[in-house]
């Protein structure tokens, strides 16, 4: 069966294959959230120091993305994706070595290697999902793929809460034995991911012929820096930087936030399971959003989501003020906790919509634009550290001002997108 025939019958095997990648990197990325309170307890870190896990992970996007764009231009989609999975596997296998030496810095190096592979994967898979079909439905396809990414982020905190946030330092005294038990739990988490990556790599190797688009090597000699000449690529990069930074910041402090006596006063394990509702909201929102984006302009949907997310963060920051006045001190903490979790639903369509709006308007080659947008994911390294520093000095509640400001800027990007029509339509798959 040809690819065009399968598209006519309503099933695109290439798109379905690429979507498995979105699930995998979502699962791995969200596995870092349970790791944050774990390393904080094991290595006796401050909030800002524990956020270095996110810094090391998302720093890879800033370092690797432009070289990844060059690799994509030279190797094409299929080989780039297989190379990325190999790098992720290497990072997972480094983690038990890091925990064996009980070295926080070695843990950060392992996370950087894993994220380097995910960066390469995102540079290839995001535009590929957008290109695998008619240009008019690119917002729908990328948002649908991101739904499966969210499925991975929902499952990972649940798995992490059982594997990492139980026993060891989370039960009883913090001593050498409890620290060692927690580090062994970390090993189990990442070795499990390594096995899954091996199976996924074998699956994609068999189906590698599907992971191509017509004329994908036309830009083989294009510069990975070409996107820096496009104002829209830069604007989209800023929006991605702020979105990822806001989403990761909230996810990273959520367990400690919900655990706080003034909020929900639940155990770390229970808070880890509640975190899955934050990521689950993103999954539900993307499933619904993919349908909405078929009927509504993407820029308007993005603006609405950003404004509501901003308002929810405002509710959290007012937990000791207006929220207490309206709901009473007994329930104000629960209201703030629910508001923080609900942000996930409105985060849902932001990344794919920003990505495709930028691809439509950028004058640079697709690999270069994708490289710049993925480089901007480094916001997930920088904003969480700022958020952690704010939490250390002003409290977890006021730390939500950092994502609040980010959502205001994303709303501005969406409104600007409404006033600018696409300049170049994406190519689509044909027989």
Image (cartoon, rainbow, N blue to C red):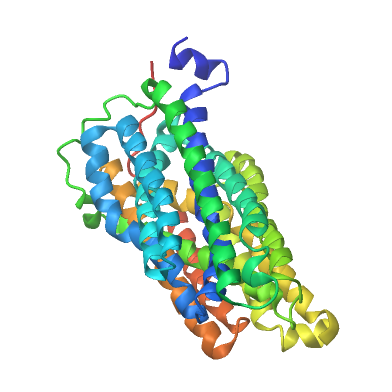
Give coordinates of residue 90: x percent, y percent: 37, 46
Q: Seen in the image, is 280 located left or right of residue 419?
A: right
Quarter holding the C terminus is top left
Q: Is residue 11 visible?
A: yes
Q: Which residue is outermost to the top?
A: 1
Quarter of the figure with residue 192: top right
In the picture as drawn, the residue positioned furthest to the front comes out as: 177
Q: Which residue is drawn at 80% across and 88% down?
A: 325
Query: In this rendering, would 118 be left or right of 292?
Result: left
In the foreground, 118 or 287: 118
Q: Can residue 137 be seen in this view?
A: no
- Taking the spot 50% from the left edge, 39% from the top edge, the residue there is 195
| Count of all numbered marks drawn on residues in the image | 0
Q: Where is residue 425 in the image (x, y as percent from the top left)?
A: 36, 37
Direction from residue 85 to residue 200 in the image, left or right: right
Q: In the image, 245: left or right of 280?
A: left
- Near-viewer residue (285 or 274): 274
Residue 83 image position (x, y, % from top left): 32, 38
Residue 407 image point, x, y percent: 53, 68
Residue at the location (59% across, 84% down)?
Answer: 398
Question: Quarter of the image holding residue 242?
Answer: bottom left
Height in image: 5 above or below 371?
above
Quarter of the image for residue 275 reads bottom right
Residue extending farthest left: 221
The residue closer to the viewer here, 271 or 325, is 271
- Tell me which residue sits at (35%, 31%) in the image: 427
């Amino acid at each position: 069966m040809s690819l065009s025939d399968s598209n006519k019958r309503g099933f695109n095997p290439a798109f379905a294959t690429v979507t498995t990648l979105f699930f995998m990197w979502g699962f791995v990325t969200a596995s870092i959230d349970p790791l944050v309170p774990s390393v904080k307890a094991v290595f006796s870190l401050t909030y800002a120091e524990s956020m270095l896990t996110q810094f090391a992970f998302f720093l890879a996007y800033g370092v690797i993305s432009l070289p990844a764009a060059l690799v994509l231009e030279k190797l094409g989609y299929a080989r780039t994706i297989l190379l990325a999975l190999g790098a992720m596997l290497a990072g997972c296998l480094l983690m038990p070595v890091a925990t064996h030496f009980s070295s926080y810095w070695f843990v950060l190096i392992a996370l950087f290697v894993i994220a380097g592979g995910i960066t390469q994967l995102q540079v290839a898979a995001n535009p590929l999902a957008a290109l695998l079909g008619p240009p008019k439905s690119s917002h729908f396809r990328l948002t649908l793929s991101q739904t499966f990414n969210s499925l991975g982020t929902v499952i990972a905190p649940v798995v992490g809460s059982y594997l990492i946030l139980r026993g060891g330092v989370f039960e009883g005294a913090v001593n050498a034995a409890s620290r060692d038990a927690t580090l062994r739990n970390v090993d189990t988490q990442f070795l499990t991911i390594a096995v899954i990556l091996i199976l996924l790599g074998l699956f994609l190797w068999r189906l590698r012929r599907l992971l191509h688009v017509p004329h994908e090597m036309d830009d083989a000699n294009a510069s990975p820096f070409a996107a820096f000449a496009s104002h829209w690529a830069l604007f989209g990069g800023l929006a991605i930087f702020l979105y990822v930074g806001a989403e990761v910041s909230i996810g990273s402090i959520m367990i400690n936030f919900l655990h706080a006596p003034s909020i929900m006063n639940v155990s770390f394990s229970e808070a880890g399971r509640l975190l899955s509702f934050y990521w689950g909201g993103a999954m539900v929102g993307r499933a619904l959003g993919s349908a909405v984006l078929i009927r509504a302009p993407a820029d308007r949907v993005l603006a609405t989501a950003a404004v509501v997310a901003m308002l929810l963060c405002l509710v959290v920051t007012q937990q000791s003020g207006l929220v207490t006045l309206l709901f009473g001190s007994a329930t104000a903490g629960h209201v703030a906790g629910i508001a923080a979790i609900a942000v996930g639903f409105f985060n849902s369509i932001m990344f794919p919509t920003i990505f495709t709006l930028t691809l439509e308007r950028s004058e640079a080659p697709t690999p270069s634009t994708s490289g710049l947008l993925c480089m901007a994911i480094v916001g997930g390294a920088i904003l969480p550290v700022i958020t952690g520093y704010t939490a250390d000095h002003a409290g977890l509640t006021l730390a939500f001002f950092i994502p609040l400001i980010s959502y205001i800027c994303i709303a501005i990007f969406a409104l600007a997108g409404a006033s600018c029509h696409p300049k170049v339509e994406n190519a689509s798959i044909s027989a």
